Image (cartoon, helix red, strand yellow):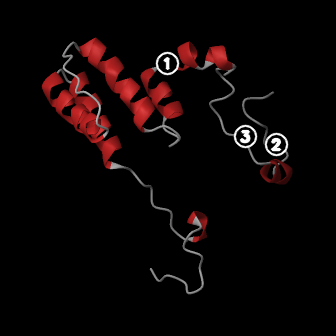
Amino acid sequence: MELAIGKNLAVADEFEVNFPIIRYAEILLNYAEAQNELGNPTEALGALNQIRARAMVPAITETDQGLLRDLIREERRRELLFEGQRFYDLHRWGLVEEILVPLGYRVGTHEYWPVPVAELDLMPNLTQYPPQ
């Protein structure tokens, strides 16, 4: 792939290919979550405490699977703040109704992106989903 001359490299969407960016901290959190769910709290703590050491906060020593799950989820919330991961995490964990519904989220409606108006204009049989 050739980089076009004259492109503004500071603008993320001026490239022909978008590469997802994933930070090492997210990889460690994914690993910690997976190890905890597999019943390996020692492995989970090792990954989780790497992130906490970098942030200069005290290490976690909790090995109870349920409590460690909550601690990992809270660490994800803090570490990945403003990175667009929270919504998908809540869906994956099945916590949408508990956390988002009290804030106005509507199950059965807000899971879907709206169909662009240009597409609706081109295809008269296409409707917005779910129908509103």
Q: Is residue 26 left or right of residue 119?
A: left
The relative height of residue 75 versus residue 21 in the rendered view (above or below) is above
Residue labelled with disc 3:
114
Residue labelled with disc 1:
95
Point out the frontmost of discs 2 and 3.
3
Q: Is residue 95 left or right of residue 123?
A: left
Give the residue type at disc 3.
Pro
Contact (Cβ within 8 Å) of mark 1 with mark 3: no
Q: Earlier in the sequence, mark 2 or mark 3?
A: 3
Q: Disc 1 versus disc 2: distance between alpha carbons?
A: 35 Å
Front one among 110 and 60: 60
Say which quadrant the N terminus sits in.
Answer: bottom left
Point out the frontmost of discs 1 and 3.
1
Residue labelled with disc 2:
125
Query: Residue sitting at 29 percent across and 13 percent down?
Result: 67
Query: Residue sitting at 36 percent across and 49 percent down?
Result: 23
The image position of residue 11, as x and y in percent, is 59, 67
Residue 42, label in figure: none
Q: Disc 2 versus disc 3: distance between alpha carbons?
A: 15 Å
Q: Quadrant of residue 97?
A: top right
Q: Is residue 40 visible?
A: no
Q: Quadrant of residue 75?
A: top left
Q: Earlier in the sequence, mark 1 or mark 3?
A: 1
Q: Earlier in the sequence, mark 1 or mark 2?
A: 1
Disc 3 crowd, CA 10 A, few/some/many (<14, 14-19, 20+):
few
Front one among 72 and 20: 72
Kind of element beneath mark 1: loop
The image position of residue 62, as x and y in percent, is 21, 16
